Image (tube, rainbow, N blue to C red):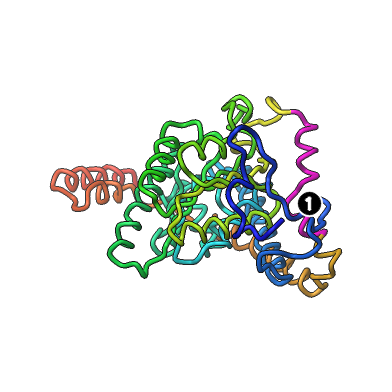
Amino acid sequence: MTDLADTPKTAFFDTGGESSPVQLLDPAGTLLHGELRSGMTPEKVRGLYRDMVLARRFDEESYHLQRQGELGLWLSCRGQEAAQVGSIRALRPTDHVFPSYREQAAALCRGLEPAELLTQWRGTAHGGWDPARYRFHITSLVLSTQLLHATGYAMGVAADQRKNPELDEIVLCYFGDGAASQGDANEALNWAAVTNAPLVFFCQNNQWAISTPSSAQSRTPLHVRAAGFGLTTTLVDGNDVLAVHAATTAAAGRVRAGGPPELIEARTYRMAGHSTSDDPTRYRESGEVSAWEGRDPIDRVQRLLDDRGWADERFLRMLDEEAKALSETTREACRALSAPPLEDSFRNTLSTETAALRAERERYTKWRESFA
């Protein structure tokens, strides 16, 4: 295979049907071309491995916090670390990202703190962080809305670039296979293509839209459908962090150079339930889960590191210590989050508190204090 940045889009999809995903590292940890490609180095591989290990530890700790009653809900990204880490690390810090509700791994790579990521699930804030600071939008819980948000934002970026050609910001939008069935998604793909918005759509096809399998959602693969709207598309092994990084780097480069918007479909798997309110054993077989466990994105990189001797004992020991420290920080940060006073709801309903809202707030405060 040639370098992904120089490969035409026809190598990635067949408009007549299904295609084979781009893969650079197989589940056994073997580089399919013998050597690293597309500017990847052993140091970068270690960095991607570190990101995935820390993301999984944070995810596991958050899952346990929910089970202990500290969080109201949690949506695990276990199994999808390669799709998120490989893609987010292919962007520039100035590129703006629109997530859905399962992008904890990507968020950690952008520098968000555990407390910021847990506030919404603890019920202490509607968001949790400043999107402008991290170039990472707040969580979108309503299915598929972030695709239209990202498209509108990218259209604004394009307008700014027409005034100042030196600007080369692009936008990346994460969504799942279930969201692809929504009308908002189809509208976003169409508008992005028509306006040539500087946007990369990144679909984590984790095989299940809650209890509905991908096979029951659409007869046509998403990357083929997106091509029909006029987007350049790529199908990639979403559990291969090297392939995801290379594909996203190539797509981002083409869009940044003025090419049409692109869509990457990353085939991956949601190892846990849709959320902590879901029981996946009711709709999928244990054999299916076991098969995907054999394709674990972290295990395959670990095998590569071991085989090539790219990670010594000191690196692994320090990573283990860092993961343990992240677990402790996550627990402490979660339990330190307290709900804001209900009076803030009156103050923040409008940009300026009206006399009527102030009167309501004062009546509520008087009523609350009467119990003391």
**Quadrant of res 334:** bottom right
Q: In front here: 327 or 151?
A: 151
The residue drawn where x is 31% and y is 44% is 368
The residue drawn where x is 76% and y is 58% is 301
The residue drawn where x is 68% and y is 41% is 269
- Secondary structure character of the magenta stretch overall: helix
State the extent of the magenta-drawn residues as a range.
285-303
The residue drawn where x is 59% and y is 44% is 265
Residue found farthest to the right: 307
Residue found farthest to the bottom: 314
Residue found farthest to the left: 355
Q: In front here: 20 or 214?
A: 20
Compared across the picture, whether 371 is left or right of 219 comes to: left
User: Is residue 327 highlighted in magenta?
Assistant: no
In x, y percent, where is residue 41?
71, 70
- Please determine whether, in this image, residue 345 is positioned above or below residue 286: below
**Which residue in the structure is indicated by mark 1?**
26
In x, y percent, where is residue 222?
56, 36
**Quadrant of res 146:** top left
- Please determine whether, in this image, residue 41 is positioned above or below residue 338: below
Quadrant the N terminus occupies? bottom right
- Please determine whether, in this image, residue 355 is positioned above or below residue 1: above
Q: Amino acid at mark 1?
A: Asp
Q: In front here: 102 or 159?
A: 159
Label 1, residues with CA under 10 Å away: few <14, some 14-19, many ≥20: some
In x, y percent, where is residue 71?
55, 46
- Please determine whether, in this image, residue 347 is positioned above or below residue 19: below
In x, y percent, where is residue 369?
30, 47
